[in-house]
Image: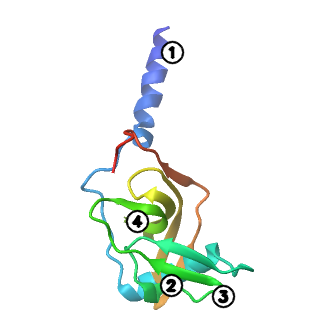
Amino acid sequence: MKRIILIGCLLTSLNSSLFSQKTADEPKATVPEEVMEQVVKRIVTWYFKAPKNPKTIYFAADIKKEWLPKIDNIDFVVLEKPARSRYNRKVYFFRDIEKRRKGIRISFGYGDDLNCGSTGDYWTCRLEGSRVKLTGPAWRRWRMGCLDENAG
């Protein structure tokens, strides 16, 4: 019985990083606008293809309208940042740009709130000379649930 408890404690301590929460001291990445423009264009082009009927796609105010690609029958709209975190509709957004060993990781998601009630994918980006090397979406998706019905 002692061995089982010891093994359980050992495994829990080894995997503690899996249960850790983000902290304020995690490295945030600042990305030059030229790089972010390439990343946004390529990710949005990967997700959206020209539909038969006209369609409007809404983005949160974390990008510039000029960064979005031109795709037939799609009108991309960048909404103004609301006073609170909630938009009055579901939007696509880029968030959590974090430094990684070999570049940065960017989250691209969709939902009605940037802090909860959204899902998305991770993309990895690194510079190779003047080229942007973009990899994704990662095999792992993320999901943010709300703890409080009135959150936001």
Classed neighbour count for the residue bearing mark 2: other residues with Cα under 10 Å, few (<14), some (14–19), many (≥20): many
Quote the CA–CA distance across marks 1 and 4: 42 Å
Classed neighbour count for the residue bearing mark 4: other residues with Cα under 10 Å, few (<14), some (14–19), many (≥20): some
Residue behind mark 2: 68
Left or right of 53 on screen, residue 31: left
Question: Are dots 3 and 2 in contact, CB under 8 Å?
Answer: no
Image x and y of residue 135, in percent: 57, 72
Quote the CA–CA distance across marks 4 and 3: 26 Å
In this orientation, which residue lies closer to the viewer: 1 or 150? 150
Quote the CA–CA distance across marks 3 and 2: 12 Å
Kind of residue indicated by mark 3: Asp
Residue behind mark 1: 4
Quote the CA–CA distance across marks 1 and 3: 61 Å
Q: Is residue 101 visible?
A: no
Quote the CA–CA distance across marks 2 and 1: 55 Å
Residue behind mark 3: 72
User: Who's the residue at 56% across and 83% down the image?
Assistant: 75
Q: Which mark is residue 95?
A: 4
